[in-house]
Amino acid sequence: MKKDNIVQQKSYQFAVRIVKTCKYLQQEKKEYILSKQLLRSGTSIGANIEEAIGGQSEKDFFAKLTISYKEARETHYWIRLLGDTGYLTKEECQSLLSDTDELLRIIGSIQKTIRVRNS
């Protein structure tokens, strides 16, 4: 992994955090359904960024990046739901949401740059 690719680094670190959160939810809270949804969408962000980086064209790169953005939005939803139903504390929720918001801003900025460059 390149050290200067911020979105790649942050999405991977976020995925690690999501895996640990889901492990906690399953082991400590005995919550299996919502945590699996969170695991799927939260780890998909970085997986799609990896696919985007390996894309065959700019169009392919943009398409995978768009999927990554959508997965981040979905992850945001699951975190809010887990917080509002008491599975995550307010502090845990705010911290995860802050990381998700940061990824959304970075991915959105990359998308905007590509749109501007191609218009």
Image (cartoon, rainbow, N blue to C red):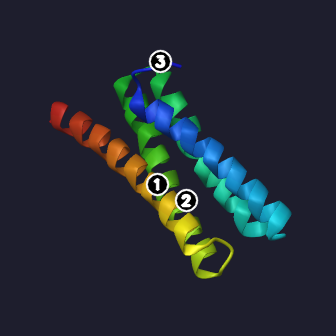
Q: CA distance from mark 2 to mark 1?
A: 8 Å
Q: Which mark is residue 75?
A: 2
Q: Are marks 3 and 1 in contact (CB under 8 Å)?
A: no
Q: Nearer the viewer, mark 2 or mark 1?
A: 1
Image position of 24 with respect to 7: above or below:
below
Q: CA distance from mark 3 to mark 2?
A: 25 Å
Q: Position of residue 16 (x, y in %)?
A: 64, 42
Q: Is residue 46 visible?
A: no
Q: Residue 92: which quarter of the image?
A: bottom right
Q: Please give the residue where the numbered disc 1 appears in the rendered image.
A: 100
Q: Residue at x 43, y 49 (%)?
A: 69
Q: Please give the residue where the numbered disc 3 appears in the rendered image.
A: 2
Q: Amino acid at mark 2?
A: Thr
Quadrant location of the C terminus?
Answer: top left
Q: Amino acid at mark 3?
A: Lys
Q: Are marks 2 and 1 in contact (CB under 8 Å)?
A: yes
55 to the left or right of 115:
right
Q: Amino acid at mark 1?
A: Thr
Mark 3 / mark 1, whichever is N-terminal: 3
Q: Nearer the viewer, mark 3 or mark 2?
A: 3
